[in-house]
Amino acid sequence: MPAESSASDGSAISQDGGNITRRIVDQLGRAIVAGDYAEQPLPIEAELSERYSASRSVTREAVKMLTAKGLISSRPRHGTRVAPEEQWNFLDPDVLRWLLSRGLSLDLLAEFTAFRSAIEPQASMLAIRRGDRKALAAIEAAIETMERVSPHDRAASLSADIEFHVAILLASGNRFMVQCRDLVETALRFSIQLTDLEKGVDFADIEAHRTIANAILAGDAARAVSATQDLLNEAAMLIERARKARG
């Protein structure tokens, strides 16, 4: 008998039902973001259940999740419809991933890099002020992983790069910054690959990342903030160059 978990409306859904719900959320979310329903109404619950071979309760849960992400709105006498893009939750990792997947948006990456510039230098400084040994050790382990990974292993190199940036956010101890973890990880998978492509390399600038790590580990807040900002400024410059090249 499949295990059961509690849905957001308090009802019980099986683990299999949960997997189907996630599949519907991903497929329908991608379709909405891609504009498939820009000129046509969103299918009603019965149609969605038939399309995805799912029960009404599973389909209803998926619609609730997409509503929470800002993609769907429901009002009395207006029914369920796709919400305007400005109402979408851009801080939701799924929404951001779908937006970037629909066609790499350089404008979106530029805005994301500006967002990073507002929090990552401060996260570096807060990591020093907090001085949590375990968190600082995670930063050191992350930079050592970056140095150890073969530059020819693109997937491992990308994962190590992301792990480094996430480690700094976590080391800040700031709950708002920590909440950005999934968002940053999602967007970096697109951003890093683009900026490396623009630089004509297949791996991260290890020296620049090591400079940030050394400054944090040495307790040099000014240097940590400056080095982090330098790295982000370069990323912003490369994205802007790509925007101009692509018109």
Image (spheres, rainbow, N blue to C red):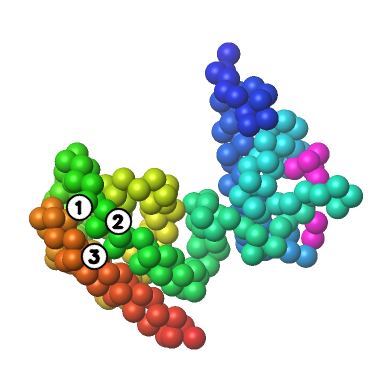
For disc 2, the marked residue is 123
**What amino acid is found at the position of numbered circle 1 in the picture?**
Ile
- Residue that mark 3 sits on: 225
Q: Closest to the observer: 62 or 135?
A: 135
**Residue 142, can we see it?**
no
Q: Residue furthest top?
A: 1
Three-letter amino acid code of the residue under disc 3:
Val
Kind of residue at disc 2: Ala
Q: Position of residue 216 (x, y in %)?
A: 17, 56
Nearer-N-terminus badge (1/2): 2
- Secondary structure under badge 2? helix
Q: Is residue 147 left or right of residue 112?
A: left
Secondary structure at badge 1 equals: helix
Q: Residue at x 59, y 41 (%)?
A: 23
Residue nearer the viewer, 192 or 77: 77
Say which label, 3 or 1, has the lower sequence index: 1
Q: Which residues are magenta?
A: 40-48
